[in-house]
Image: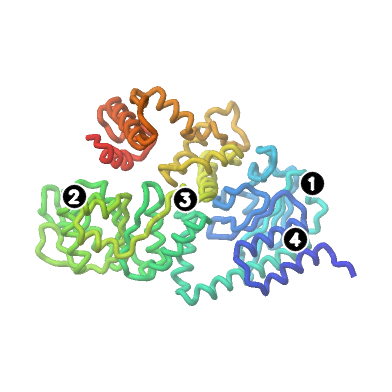
Amino acid sequence: MTATPLLRALLPLVRDLSRELPENERYRRLLQALRDLLPCDAAALLRLDGEWLVPLAVDGLTPDTLGRRFKISEHPRFQILLSQPTPTRFPSDSPLPDPYDGLVNAPQVDLHVHDCMGCPLLVEDRPWGLLTLDALRPEQFQRVELDELQAFASLAAATVTVAERITHLALRAEDERQRAELYRQASHPERQLVGQSEAHRQLLDQVHLVAASELTVLVTGETGVGKELVAQALHQASLRADKPLISLNCAALPDTLVESELFGHVRGAFTGAHGDRRGKFELAHGGTLFLDEVGELSLTVQAKLLRVLQSGQLQRLGSDREHRVDVRVIAATNRDLAEEVRQGRLRADFYHRLSVYPLRVPPLRERGRDVLLLAGTFLEQNRSRLGLNGLRLAADAQTALLRYDWPGNVRELEHLIGRSALKALGRQAHRPRILSLTTSDLDLPSSTAIATAIETSAIPFVGQSAGDLRQSLDDFQRHLIQRSLAQHAQNRAAAARDLGIDRANLSRLCKRLGID
């Protein structure tokens, strides 16, 4: 007896149900079987997360699709698919915009999806997510039997149920609630920790390990890597998740106000103190206090903060009365605090109190293809802001993003995508259905531009040996920074914008290069 195509597609999945497979591999096999059963140009598995759909696996779509988060209210096709209990097939001439327009892997980058069909996945009779299929050829799905997709969807629902149960069983031994909360927070569309690289997975493992404890955590990393998101993940995965998370940027306030912000004050404590005010510690009582840029605190404030960290007791400015607080502290810095201690700018006891559990956030250049997933997140955000049907990266732009070393990290990528999309749209004579960003739109610094800058600079490189390379580079950086500062009347914020770097990075460079 010859097996039908449906049976041939389902049998491997049935066998997979009893096998231990990584979640990604299980979902990859699911989509491959779907495309074998119903030939198409692309397929996707999306999980429902509140008012968003989060891609878990894609086949035939660009890599950045996995980093996108689709807001259901902005995509009418998704709304229709979720509203129906059975599969839906859209007409080839449907005027509804397709979420995957321009995202299907094809030689021609701006091909629109013509045929689209999909089916909701129900787990315990509740919507869990969607299976979608897309084709670039009109009427490709017209002869497809919807019953076959319905049968496949039923087995797909069993597949995701098995995957989730295996995950929950594995997590139960290591505190399921905290890990599940971490996963929820990390994938939340508005507070994302997006990535699949080994460096990113190791970070999430470390976050999970320390989150459930009461240890003070020092989050370190370069500017723009997402230290605040890590702090949020630590709080949300902790036993204090239902209590407040209070944040303070220590670099944003003058010393005269930091103490009041941290410890509060009583009426008359200083000019302008017209009433009693609770500080961040009291506001965070029972929860978590996040101290960003903690290395910017003065030695005086460090001493007072150390006392609170040690005893849990504080006094408001102008008061003799002590308040006891129960607060977990998470601190963050882009400085080398051990070096700050050696230079006398940071108290050794304060440093050791903060760094009970140091947690390094890897820079973007160490995360490989995560840059494309993150780009997908920012592309979808900007597509929505600009009111576009589709916003994508051309192949040369993807290559350029992977080759760039990202001195400004994730923040630089976010700003680059937003700026490039706006510029590219402004250059269009007519509003396009799909806007593709190319390498020229991204306007990334290149080795050619650096070489040109060196040739036109006034630095006397001639006659220096290869052994002087580091000194030559330092001289070159010093020359460019001094020239930019002179052009902007020593305004470091303006000079940083001119040089295309973060102001904190510029300050560190100036200190290292001896620029006053």
**In the visual, does 153 lie left or right of 385?**
right
Within the image, what quadrant is residue 211 found in? bottom left
Q: CA distance from mark 1 to mark 2?
A: 67 Å
Q: CA distance from mark 4 to mark 3?
A: 41 Å
| Residue at image mark 3 | 366
| Residue at image mark 4 | 149
| Residue at image mark 2 | 257
Of labels 1 and 2, earlier in sequence is 1
State the mark number for residue 139. 1
Helix, strand or loop at mark 3: helix
Contact (Cβ within 8 Å) of mark 4 with mark 1? no
Helix, strand or loop at mark 4: helix
Helix, strand or loop at mark 2: helix
**Label 1 packing within 10 angstroms: few (<14), some (14-19), many (20+):** some
* Number of marks drawn: 4
Disc 1 residue type? Glu
